[in-house]
Image (spheres, rainbow, N blue to C red):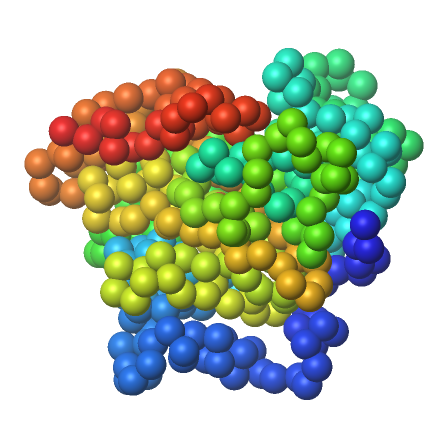
């Protein structure tokens, strides 16, 4: 498997050689995409760095531009550092275990949480292995639907702390997105919120080589040309912790595919389908993908902040004065249609928000 034993997104040079400042790294990765643009234009169309603790008017402006153009931004001062460090250690340790160990908690139709190594996106197999979990219940409560690796108590504790920290940061990030969209409005009462009960975490490991052995590949869908094929996330927003390997890209209206650069001590945020519907298309559910790994494995961990089970998805009048471009539908019906084809090729693409467009 060859998984790294230590993963930290706070050390950008361990795999890449000479140390460069955060700004230099960010700029170097983006300048190819933005070419001749001025610094001001670059900031407006690329992936801005936003403080979650102290967000000024200029940052709200950058956030607004990014959410209209592609839906990605980076967060600093997110308050998740300790939880991220523990999660990283346990994620790397888990994926470094023998396959028999991981497959003991294999995700199935009837047990939809746990380990999986043949995820489909857009009817093509992704070149990665994953571990999915929902909000952990109290130890011994008996109603925890999660499958945990046996004899690794630290893993469960780390994932519990990470879930809690990510839920809190995601709620604050959503407030920030609302403030960027409806600038001048401080009272956010009544606007839709996320729900920890429907939110999920996925540990991702993208190895350089196919995680399936040759004899396992005959009965599964072929991989395509991407490690993770282009898609949008279905929920409100995603907080993504990624290591310094790179490879994540988003589709900008202005620039086409651009890199979402790794930057130390940051968390990546991207909007999902629910936010696009609530904002009546003013903000964009980020279309994104991951290019194949060629030299080193990549680790990433998204936290999917989702609406409540019975939440209604429809344009919110307080967020847009334009006539609604979507009819209303529920989160429950939408998410069912989005996840069904992750297990098997059902012969058609999964449902998208376009199905509900008026
Ligand atoms: Fe995604």
| Horizontal and vertical percent position of residue 284 | 30, 49
Residue at image location 75% in from the left, 47% down from the top:
91
Tell me the quarter of the picture where residue 38 sits.
Answer: bottom left
Percent across and percent down for residue 145 are: 68, 19
Left or right of 157 in this view: 193: left
* Direction from residue 298 to residue 175 in the image, left or right: left
Q: Is residue 267 visible?
A: no
User: Is 51 in front, or is 285?
Assistant: 285
Q: Quadrant of residue 349?
A: top left
Residue 259 spot, x, y in % from top left: 45, 65
Judge whether 185 appears above or below 160 on screen.
below
- Residue lying furthest right: 151
Q: Is residue 214 visible?
A: yes
Q: Which residue is more in the foreground, 291 or 24?
A: 291
As drawn, is 24 to the left or to the right of 96? left
- Is 323 drawn above or below residue 296 in the view shown? above
Quarter of the image with the C terminus in it? top left
Q: Find residue 147 and report its horizontal and vertical position in percent.
A: 74, 25
> Residue 37 falls in which quadrant of the image?
bottom left
Residue at image point 52% right, 83% down: 24
Please name the residue shown 61% across and 69% down the image.
264
Q: Nearer the viewer, residue 281 or 345?
A: 345
């Amino acid at each position: 498997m060859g998984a790294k034993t230590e993963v930290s997104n706070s050390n950008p040079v361990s795999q890449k050689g000479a140390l460069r400042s955060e700004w230099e790294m960010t700029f170097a990765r983006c300048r190819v995409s933005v070419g001749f643009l001025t610094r001001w234009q670059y900031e407006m169309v690329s992936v801005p760095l936003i403080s979650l603790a102290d967000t000024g008017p200029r940052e709200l402006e950058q956030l607004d531009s990014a959410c209209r153009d592609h839906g990605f931004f980076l967060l600093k001062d997110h308050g998740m550092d300790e939880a991220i460090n523990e999660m990283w250690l346990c994620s790397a340790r888990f994926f470094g275990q023998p396959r028999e160990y991981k497959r003991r908690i294999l995700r199935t139709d009837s047990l939809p949480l746990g380990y999986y190594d043949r995820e489909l996106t857009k009817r093509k197999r992704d070149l990665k292995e994953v571990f999915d979990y929902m909000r952990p219940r109290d130890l011994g409560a008996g109603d925890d639907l999660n499958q945990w690796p046996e004899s690794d108590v630290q893993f469960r504790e780390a994932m519990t702390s990470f879930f809690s920290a990510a839920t809190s940061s995601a709620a604050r990030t959503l407030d920030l997105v609302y403030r960027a969209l409806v600038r001048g409005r401080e009272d956010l009462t009544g606007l839709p919120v996320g729900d920890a009960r429907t939110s999920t975490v996925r540990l991702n490991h993208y190895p350089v080589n196919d995680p399936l052995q040759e004899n396992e590949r005959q009965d599964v869908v072929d991989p395509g040309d991407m490690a993770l094929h282009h898609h949008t996330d279905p929920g409100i927003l995603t907080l993504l912790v990624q290591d310094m390997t790179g490879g994540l890209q988003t589709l900008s209206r202005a620039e086409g595919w651009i890199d979402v650069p790794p930057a130390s001590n940051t968390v990546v945020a991207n909007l999902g389908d629910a936010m696009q519907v609530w904002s009546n298309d003013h903000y964009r559910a980020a279309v994104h993908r991951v290019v194949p790994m060629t030299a080193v494995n990549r680790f990433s961990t998204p936290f999917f902040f989702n609406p409540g089970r019975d939440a209604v998805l429809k344009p919110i009048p307080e967020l847009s004065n334009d006539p609604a471009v979507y009819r209303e539908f529920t989160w429950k019906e939408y998410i069912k249609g989005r996840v069904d084809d992750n297990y098997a090729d059902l012969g058609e693409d999964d449902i998208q928000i376009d199905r509900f467009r008026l």
